[in-house]
Amino acid sequence: MWEGKRPSDDLNFYSLVSLVQCGMWLQEDLEKYLARHGLSYGRFSILLAILESEGKRLSGGEVARAVGVGKATVSKLVAKLLEEGLVELGPGSGDAREKSYRLSAAGRRSLGRVVP
């Protein structure tokens, strides 16, 4: 595969590893920053997705697609956001099984503190 070379001799490989490491450091720093505001990255991502969809009904499945996680994960994270009063149930689609979400006033204030 590397024809007698080590993977670290390949500049492309080394660059990729460095890029991945930088991403891990950035994610760690972001998690620390969000924790100071009482949020995890997952809950923050959901708040942003809901903010971006203002004016439209956003279902749990749509939130899951927007943040790149499964519906079960979104369900747990949204339950926490509802409990904290950062998210409210929005108007339904008529299907009792499908809920939609919107930011509460507290959710807007929370995002305002995190995102200057």
Image (cartoon, rainbow, N blue to C red):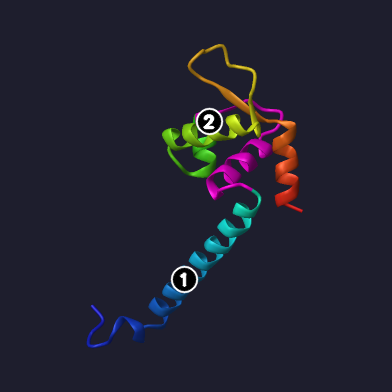
Q: Quadrant of residue 10?
A: bottom left
Q: How many marks?
A: 2
x%, y% of residue 22? Answer: 51, 70
Q: Is residue 112 above or below residue 85?
A: below
Secondary structure, mark 2, is helix
Look at label 1 and name its amino acid. Gln
Based on the picture, tell me whether residue 8 belongs to the magenta stretch: no
Q: Is residue 92 left or right of residue 5?
A: right
Based on the picture, tell me whether residue 48 belongs to the magenta stretch: yes
x%, y% of residue 100? Answer: 59, 24
x%, y% of residue 54? Answer: 70, 32
Q: Which mark is residue 79?
A: 2
Q: Is residue 9 left or right of residue 39?
A: left
Report the residue marked by disc 1: 21
Look at label 2 and name its amino acid. Ala
Label 1 vs label 2, nearer the camera: 2
Marked residue nearer the N-terminal end (1 or 2):
1
Label 1 to label 2, Cα distance in Å?
A: 32 Å
Q: Quadrant of the N terminus?
A: bottom left
x%, y% of residue 102? Answer: 66, 29
Give 83 or 59, whichever is nearer the viewer.
83
